[in-house]
Image (spheres, helix red, strand yellow):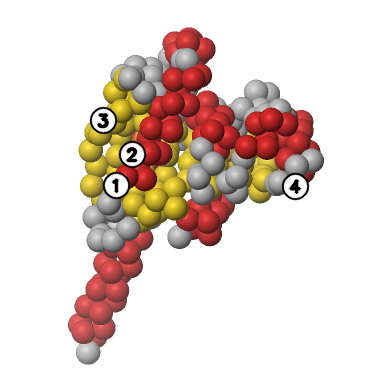
Amino acid sequence: MHRIAMLICVSLFVASFAGAQAPVKTETVHFKSGAETASGYLAMPTSPGRHPALVVIQEWWGLNDWVKEQAREFAEHGYVALAPDLYHGQVTAVPSEASKLARSLPRDRAIRDLKAAYNYLAAMPNVNMDKIGSIGWCMGGGYSLQLAIHEPKLAACVIDYGELTTDPAEIKKIKAPLMGNFGAEDHGIPPSAVHAFEKALQAQGKSIDAKIYPGASHAFENENNKAGYRPEAAKDAKARTLEFLDKHLK
């Protein structure tokens, strides 16, 4: 009886683990973006049927391993996740180079690539085209918001310490539910910018589920940010993100 009970416990553990981290498939895909061809890292569940989807948007470092890891984690959670390569092949771990790449990225091209990624997901047979959202961190957080501004069919938008706006014309275009995670000690996206964004949204009858984490600065969710990583805040932000996305996309 003891051996049978042990086998049952092991079976339940394996089943639980498999449910929490479903098998995923990953590949590099290419898609048309205007007259150009863009590419991205695609991670998706292997289970049958139509799934919700996410455009996963890089930090200023480029389409690096950390962003790919986020895409895989979302795929394990049941999402078809596409991380477009906004730098078209360039990646760095040097802050000065990342700053240069971010400044030289044509904003219109980046938005065009993001919309093309959205359209690629919408055309996939295993994607529910009405349940596509976006998420981004740092530079990508700002572009997640820009996708919400430029793609009216976007079904959810998560902004992780990304550039915000108070432009009434841009605010008016936003249709997607918004959620954001920010650091109280972030000097690039300070709490005052978050509050100004909230006020601009409220003026047009809109809102954001925003949380400002005490003691956290910029990029507090990335464990590679040795000085600024805040594990407890990162864990909470991820839990909030999944709850928000599941609510609006599943």
- Specify the amino acid type for callout 1: Met
Q: Please say whether residue 91 is visible from this viewpoint.
A: no
Hey, which quadrant is residue 178 in on the image?
top right
- The residue that label 2 is drawn on is 120
Q: Position of residue 59 (x, y in %)?
A: 47, 27
Which badge, 4 or 1, is on the more N-terminal residue? 1
**Callout 1: SS:** loop
Res. 124 mark: 1
**Callout 3: SS:** strand
Depth check, front residue: 18 or 215: 18
- The residue that label 3 is drawn on is 30
Residue at (22%, 89%) from the top-left corner?
A: 1
- Specify the amino acid type for callout 2: Tyr
CB under 8 Å between discs 1 and 2: yes
Res. 205 mark: 4
Q: Position of residue 235 (x, y in %)?
A: 52, 48
